[in-house]
Image (spheres, rainbow, N blue to C red):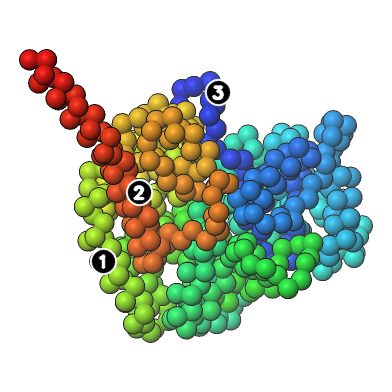
Amino acid sequence: MANVLSTAKPLTVNPLKLSQPLGGASAFMGLAGSLPMLHAAQGCTAFALVLLVRHYREAIPFQTTAMNEVTTILGGKDNLEEAIINIVNRAHPKVIGICSNGLIEARGEDIRGDLKLIRQRHPELADTALVYASTPDYKGGFQEGWASAVTAMVDQLVEPEIARNPRQINILAGCHLTPADLEEIRDTVEAFGLHPIILPDIAGSLDGHIADEWVLTTLGGTSVEDIRHMGRSIATLALGLQLEPAARLIEARCGVPAEVYPHLTGLLAWDNFIAALARLSGKPVPQSIRRRRSQLLDAMLDGHFYFGKKKIAIAAEPDLMLGLTQFFADMGAEIETAVTTSDGAALALVPAKEVRIGDLDDLEQAAGHCDLLIAHSHGARVAERLGVPFFRAGFPLFDRLGAAHKLSVGYRGTRDLIFEIGNLFIEHQHHNHQPHNHQTREHGTDAAVASH
């Protein structure tokens, strides 16, 4: 069990953490016909929008209530009402996901009450779901904002039901999963003859496809109707400890049993997930999945020579950190330095002596002697200064193409992770044995012999 430490620094030197509103808005991107909106100042919204566009390299539908100095003091209800009406008239969304920020939450605005009044005054909003998630950016981080938004979707949209569909299951997807990860999960669930409702499903809206039409909202994702009927499912599988509260909420409201899978990277983690699907479907594991498992075992045999005793430094959100550190521990590497954004249940499970809640500066101070550094793209400069090989993981990844298509779950994703990182180790090993290094050493030896 890792010892969790908090930084003693009075300020953040090199930020690692991203804000709750950004995490909440990202989750709302996984709903069909959705328009995420920050109840915040324009600058706060613009900053979040830039990160989303740079990561996904797609047009991101994103709105703001444009709070200013006056409305911050007098109250933002009028801004909220005007923004909702304008959005509905122009974009006709199925759902508007409203995320607050520190500016709104510190004032203590009653947004739920405001939304109730707005609905009473505007009956034309009857067909538009308004989902509010409290995401103050003075606490928590990206992961907490995502979890808060998913819990709000469940709380405000899922309806109690008694009837069950024996082929339907709920999948609650954590923020550490990419669109490619969700596609892998969906394909695997469907291979057992089950119908998954994935919430939120960013694979449908942010997988980098060229749409046949252009709309002002998200195109693809989980429909509001499907969310309302999640109570018909026979089970809820929460992927990430961050979503256990949302899964328990469905269980309490609808009687749908909840199961929590901290991560799906690695042999044992995916084995457990496959076993659950076989149990829920009553069907044997398909031969194609057995073949992929065999391929992963072979990859582990091929790769363990390059991972053994390697020292790893990682900075990531809690659930992503748990999955990656467990993967490296399984391959024989050692987690030397682990830095994360906020406290949570996942940290105690990280296979390291200690996990520090801090920033990229904390990572840089402790990672100089490590063999590999892992972080999102803001960690690239740290790795460059230290001269340590760098592997990009998490959000945002703005200095490489294909962030949405990075696969790290399941037998295939774990296999590809072994090859990608193993090749990084091999490449760095070769860089440390360049011909000129040998020549320099030989020249130095000759010179030393000649001097005697």
Q: Amino acid at mark 2?
A: Leu
Q: Is residue 408 left or right of residue 109?
A: left
Q: Name the spot of residue 149 as percent of width and height, x first.
A: 63, 53
Image location (x, y in percent) of residue 359: 49, 32
Mark 2, mark 1: which one is toward the viewer?
Answer: 2
> Taking 365 as reference, is 294 left or right?
left
Q: CA distance from mark 2 to mark 3?
A: 34 Å
Relative to residue 399, is residue 411 depicted above or below?
Answer: below
Secondary structure under the numbered disc 3 in the rendered image: loop
Find residue 65 and report its horizontal and vertical position in percent: 82, 45
The residue tagged 1 is 297
Q: Residue at x 45, y 80 (%)?
A: 191
Dot 3 amino acid type: Leu
Q: Which residue is mark 2?
A: 424
Q: Are marks 3 and 1 in contact (CB under 8 Å)?
A: no
Viewer-nearest residue: 414 or 25: 414
Identify the residue shown where x is 37% and y is 36%: 388
**First in residue order: circle 2 vs circle 1:** 1
Q: Is residue 238 visible?
A: no
Res. 197 mark: none
Q: Residue furthest top?
A: 451
Residue 270's quadrant in the figure?
A: bottom left
Residue 438 in which image quadrant: top left
User: Considering the image in quadrants, where does the N terminus appear?
Assistant: top left
